[in-house]
Image: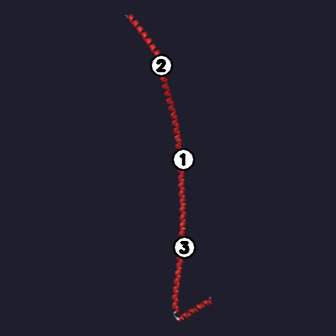
């Protein structure tokens, strides 16, 4: 029986080896190439994805750098515009102050001229009133003086003397 077991063992080993080789041959011919192709394709896909990710990373860095540059330029431009706006504001305020000063001086001069004109008119009016009052007083005094004959005679003589002296 040992011989039978040995023969059976050797036969079994032979058939197992033959089946294993046949399986390897079939796998190599029909399955190995498609599996390796799929693995290579998968490897290429992963490599392409990594390359695309690296390219995207570089592009993102470029976009970030461009964004920072544009942001810096925008800030610089904003600062320049703000500075210009401040200068314009200060210029407008300065011009308004100067114009207000000129207008104020003009109004003051006009007011002073009007006051001077009113003062002259008032002085002229007062002079006219004083002259009228003087004439009225003189009329009253002269009427009273002339109402008496002796006083009339003396007044005429005094006037004649004044005329002669001049």
Give the spatial CA distance, label 1 vs label 3.
Answer: 59 Å
Q: Mark 3 or mark 2: which comes first in sequence? A: 2
- Where residue 15 appears, as percent x and y from the top left, is 43, 10
Question: Could you tell me which secondary element the residue under label 1 belongs to?
Answer: helix
Mark 1–mark 3 contact, CB under 8 Å?
no
Residue drawn at (51%, 31%) of the image: 52
- Where residue 37 appears, as percent x and y from the top left, is 49, 22
Disc 3 packing (10 Å; few <14; some 14–19; many ≥20): few
Q: Mark 1 or mark 3: which comes first in sequence? A: 1
Residue 163 vs 65, above or below: the answer is below
- Where residue 68 appears, as percent x and y from the top left, is 52, 41
Q: Which mark is residue 117?
A: 3
Give the spatial CA distance, label 3 vs label 2.
Answer: 123 Å
Question: Could you tell me which secondary element the residue under label 2 belongs to?
Answer: helix
Question: Could you tell me which secondary element the residue under label 3 belongs to?
Answer: helix
Q: Mark 1 or mark 2: which comes first in sequence? A: 2
Disc 1 packing (10 Å; few <14; some 14–19; many ≥20): few
Residue drawn at (55%, 66%) of the image: 106
Residue 88 vs 13, above or below: the answer is below
Labels 3, 2: front one: 2
Q: What residue would you read off at disc 1?
A: 77
Residue drawn at (52%, 82%) of the image: 130
Q: What residue would you read off at disc 2?
A: 32
Labels 1, 2: front one: 2
> On the image, which quarter does residue 162 sit in?
bottom right
Quadrant location, the N terminus: top left
Quadrant location, the C terminus: bottom right
Q: Nearer the viewer, residue 62 or 21?
A: 21
């Amino acid at each position: 029986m040992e011989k039978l077991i040995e023969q059976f063992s050797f036969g079994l080993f032979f058939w197992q080896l033959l089946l294993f080789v046949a399986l390897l041959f079939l796998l190599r011919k029909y399955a190995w190439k498609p599996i390796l192709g799929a693995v290579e394709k998968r490897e290429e896909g992963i490599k392409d994805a990594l390359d695309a990710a690296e390219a995207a990373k570089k592009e993102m860095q470029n976009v970030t750098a461009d964004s920072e540059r544009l942001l810096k330029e925008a800030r610089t431009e904003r600062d320049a515009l703000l500075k210009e706006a401040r200068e314009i504001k200060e210029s407008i305020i300065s011009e308004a102050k100067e114009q207000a000063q000129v207008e104020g001086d003009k109004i003051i001069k006009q007011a002073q001229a009007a006051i001077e004109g009113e003062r002259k008119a008032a002085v002229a009016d007062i002079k006219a009133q004083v002259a009228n009052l003087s004439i009225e007083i003189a009329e009253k005094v002269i009427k009273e003086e002339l109402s008496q004959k002796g006083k009339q005679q003396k007044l005429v003589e005094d006037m004649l003397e004044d005329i002669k002296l001049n």
